Image (spheres, rainbow, N blue to C red):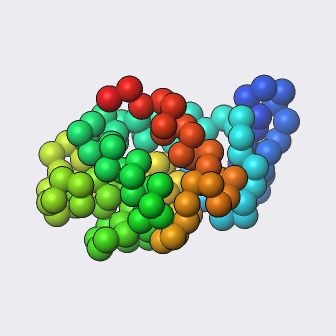
Amino acid sequence: MKFEIKSRWDGSIKFEGEFRSFKLCVVAAVKSDADLRGAVLTPIRDDFWAILSAAPAEVPALIEALKAGKVNGSTYEGECACLVGTIANARKCNYAKIPGLTPNSHRPAEAFFTAIKPGALPRRTRRRRSRWNGLRSGWRG
């Protein structure tokens, strides 16, 4: 099926392709380093905020992990872990034991984080800087 990621401002197509789901389209766009500033990505945003709302006390640790390059979107465990794994590290518990937060690599926010590799810092790439700015400016915890 053909999916398009459009600009919220003028409706122009920022990325498009044949994919089985919108999630796979977004993952491909992120991996290709497509410029998604101003893109309509509300399913990812909403899922991201749902995850943060399930673990508000861990948001500062998540921000610090992003700033330090200690996020690895491909694994739930270890010093560098994915979104849910980093929350579990901050909470000092197993990633599968966070009340109200079930690990699911198919969730939009977790799929979006798969593009973050260990050592990636917000200031190094446009994509990571955009994620960092959105997190920093939007979280009111």
Whether residue 140 is visible: yes
Q: Which quadrant of the structure image shows residue 133?
A: top right
- Position of 14 with respect to 105 (left or right) is right
Q: In the rendering, at what x and y percent does residue 116 appear?
A: 53, 63
Q: In the rendering, at what x and y percent does residue 16 appear?
A: 77, 51
Name the residue: 24% across, 55% down: 90
Q: In the rendering, at what x and y percent does residue 59 appear?
A: 33, 42
On screen, residue 107 above or below 140:
below
Whether residue 26 is visible: no
Q: Which quadrant of the structure image shows residue 54?
A: top left
Q: State which quarter of the image contains the C terminus.
A: top left
Name the residue: 36% across, 66% down: 81
Q: In the rendering, at what x and y percent does residue 135 appear?
A: 48, 39
The front one of 79 and 9 is 79
On screen, residue 52 above or below 31:
above
On screen, residue 72 above or below 43:
below
Name the residue: 27% across, 36% down: 56
On screen, residue 97 above or below 79:
above
